[in-house]
Image: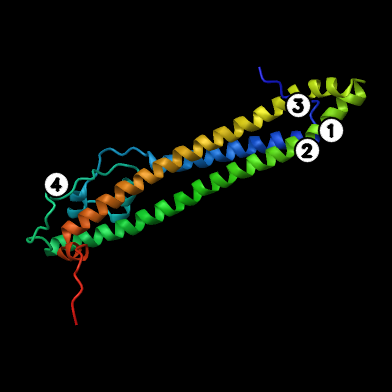
């Protein structure tokens, strides 16, 4: 069992352990809030046909895409050539709705990215502050054993090391938990962004004939 020596700890260590506990609680609450948006379960997975039928709003479509509840199926699966029959009035309406959904998705992704960035800053701040407090508490702890217990310098160091390691292990565990939370959310966010960018880019090109032209390299004309 981990012995934290709370009663015998210096004031700086007590404050550090208290702050680490608060940081973990804050990080877990923030992670649960973000995970709710990333993994919220709906009754059915949506597709582009839901936008075409006007059964959902573009904002809802973007939120569903962010929660991985949209089927990323291209319109012309397996066909890499533009469809000349497209760019109809109905397709232009769907394309407009898809662009609105893209704006909403970018907003959700940006706000979520800010939350993961805050977790990363908290991770680095926790590691730096923990290292500073533990290093600054090493000498007072050694002096406590050397003068109060009347031990030699080496004996006092051997007695102080287990206590310092106990405090350091708690700080290391807190940093590890923060890193796992940040890395998991960051990887999930990037995966959702890649999937949406592929779906939006390909679908918008298939819905608009201009989209295919914009991606085609134009040879420079000679003057």
The Cα atoms of the two marked residues, 4 and 3, are separated by 63 Å
Specify the farthest residue to the front: 222
Question: Which element carries disc 1, helix, strand or loop?
Answer: helix
**The quarter of the displayed image where residue 19 is located:** top right
Question: Which element carries disc 2, helix, strand or loop?
Answer: helix
The Cα atoms of the two marked residues, 1 and 3, are separated by 15 Å
- Lower sequence index among marks 1 and 3: 3
Q: Which of 223 and 79 lies nearest the eye of the viewer?
A: 223
The Cα atoms of the two marked residues, 2 and 3, are separated by 17 Å
Residue of label 3: 6
- Which is in the foreground here, disc 1 or disc 3? 1
Question: Which element carries disc 3, helix, strand or loop?
Answer: loop
Question: Which element carries disc 4, helix, strand or loop?
Answer: loop
Is residue 199 something one can see in this rendering?
yes
On residue 77, which mark appears? 4
Vertically, is 129 above or below 148?
Answer: below
In the picture, which quadrant includes the C terminus? bottom left
Dots 1 and 2: beta carbons under 8 Å? yes
Vertically, is 114 above or below 132?
Answer: below
In the picture, which quadrant includes the N terminus? top right
Residue of label 2: 136
Q: Position of residue 197 (x, y in %)?
A: 30, 52
Residue of label 1: 140
Q: Residues within 10 Å of mark 1 (few under 14, many from 20)?
A: few
- Which is in the foreground here, disc 2 or disc 4? 2
Dots 4 and 3: beta carbons under 8 Å? no
The Cα atoms of the two marked residues, 2 and 4, are separated by 63 Å
Q: Which of 144 and 188 lies nearest the eye of the viewer?
A: 144
Q: Is residue 155 left or right of residue 54?
A: right
Residue at (25%, 50%) from the top-left corner? 199
Q: Position of residue 145 (x, y in %)?
A: 86, 24
Q: Position of residue 113 (x, y in %)?
A: 46, 50
């Amino acid at each position: 069992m981990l012995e934290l020596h709370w009663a015998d700890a210096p004031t700086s260590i007590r404050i550090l352990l208290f702050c680490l506990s608060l940081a973990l609680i804050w990080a877990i609450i923030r992670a649960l809030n973000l995970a709710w948006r990333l993994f919220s379960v709906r009754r059915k997975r949506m597709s582009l046909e839901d936008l075409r039928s006007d059964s959902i709003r573009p904002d809802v479509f973007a939120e569903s895409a962010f929660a991985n509840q949209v089927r990323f199926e291209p319109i012309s699966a397996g066909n890499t050539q533009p469809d000349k029959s497209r760019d109809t009035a109905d397709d232009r309406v769907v394309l407009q709705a898809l662009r609105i959904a893209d704006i909403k998705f970018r907003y959700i992704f940006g706000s979520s990215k800010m939350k993961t960035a805050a977790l990363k800053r908290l991770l680095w701040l926790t590691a730096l502050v923990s290292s500073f407090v533990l290093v600054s508490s090493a000498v007072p702890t050694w002096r406590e054993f050397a003068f109060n217990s009347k031990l030699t310098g080496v004996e006092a160091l051997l007695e102080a090391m287990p206590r310092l390691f106990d405090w350091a292990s708690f700080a290391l565990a807190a940093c590890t938990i923060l890193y796992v939370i940040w890395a998991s959310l960051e990887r999930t966010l990037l995966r959702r962004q890649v999937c949406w960018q592929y779906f939006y880019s390909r679908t918008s090109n298939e819905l608009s004939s201009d989209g295919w032209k914009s991606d085609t390299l134009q040879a420079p004309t000679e003057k």
